[in-house]
Image: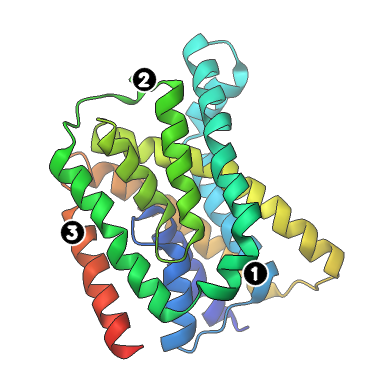
Amino acid sequence: MTHSEALFLGILQGITEFLPVSSSGHLVLAEKFLRVEGGGLAFDVFLHLGTLLAILIYFWRDWKEMFSLKDPHYRKFLGYLILATIPGALMGVLLEDLVASHFRTTARVAFQLAAMSLPLLLAELLSPKKKELREINLWQSLLIGCAQGLAIFPGTSRSGITMSAGLLLGFKREAAARFSFLLSAPIIAGAGLYEGIKVFKAGVSLSPAYFTGFIAAFVSGFLVIAWLLNFLRRHTFYPFVAYRLLLALLVWRVG
């Protein structure tokens, strides 16, 4: 892998991890249509660690409050995040091999891109969007966590499906996005650790290009988090719905 390929894939990962458009789907499409080869399991770990660092640094005040365990509200919120991570982690472990062997084709990605634009569209149309994040409870957290489990299928979008669930539960756009971002940290960290152990056991040598991808994913991810939270204060998710449908049509026609 060259540094330019690592840079491109790192930026692509950082942007699409947090926008509701599917990072895994875009990486599959980049390999298929742009002939940009992924760096394998070790490189994927580095990309996800880059996006994890973006979440940790951008929301550092929230993490500090949660792990200080002083404020009852933040202490309870940390518990919600941990419990909401369990459904996605279980689905990831149970369905990993099935998804890798049957769902990483362009046809499947096109279908998921189109089908999973529907929850986002319905959420925009039906949600009252009145609740603040501080109003979230245990059951709402678990429902969003169950939705996160669907993100194992390329083309679904982890952020897209969790934001859709948040909206359908009545939360404001920015609140739904914030919970989605915070909820992604444990699942990304767990997946990184799980895959990292595999890399370590396999004795994979690390290429300098991996660090290029890591930095690119971190910087682009950090900027996208900041941009999207600001964007959602005044705009809807409709542009992302349109993008997903157009991309799905393009992939279906070309693929």
Counting residues from the start of the chain, the first of labels 3 and 1 encountered is 1
Which residue is labeled 3 in the image?
A: 239
**Structural crowding at the residue carrying mark 1, measured as other residues with C-alpha within 10 Å and reported as few (<14), some (14–19) or many (≥20):** many
Report the coloring of the rendering.
rainbow
Which residue is labeled 2 in the image?
A: 134
Helix, strand or loop for disc 1: helix
Counting residues from the start of the chain, the first of labels 2 and 1 encountered is 1
Asked whether, in this view, residue 103 is left or right of residue 194, the answer is left
Say if residue 58 shows up in the picture: no
- The amino acid marked with disc number 1 is Phe
- The amino acid marked with disc number 2 is Arg
Q: Residue at x 50, y 44 (%)?
A: 184
Picture quadrant where residue 56 is located:
top right
**Structural crowding at the residue carrying mark 3, measured as other residues with C-alpha within 10 Å and reported as few (<14), some (14–19) or many (≥20):** few
- The amino acid marked with disc number 3 is Pro
Q: Nearer the viewer, residue 234 or 215?
A: 234
Helix, strand or loop for disc 2: helix
Which residue is labeled 1 in the image?
A: 43
Q: Do residues under tags 3 and 1 come within 8 Å of each other at their CB atoms?
A: no
Asked whether, in this view, residue 132 is left or right of residue 34, the answer is left
Asked whether, in this view, residue 179 is left or right of residue 200, the answer is left
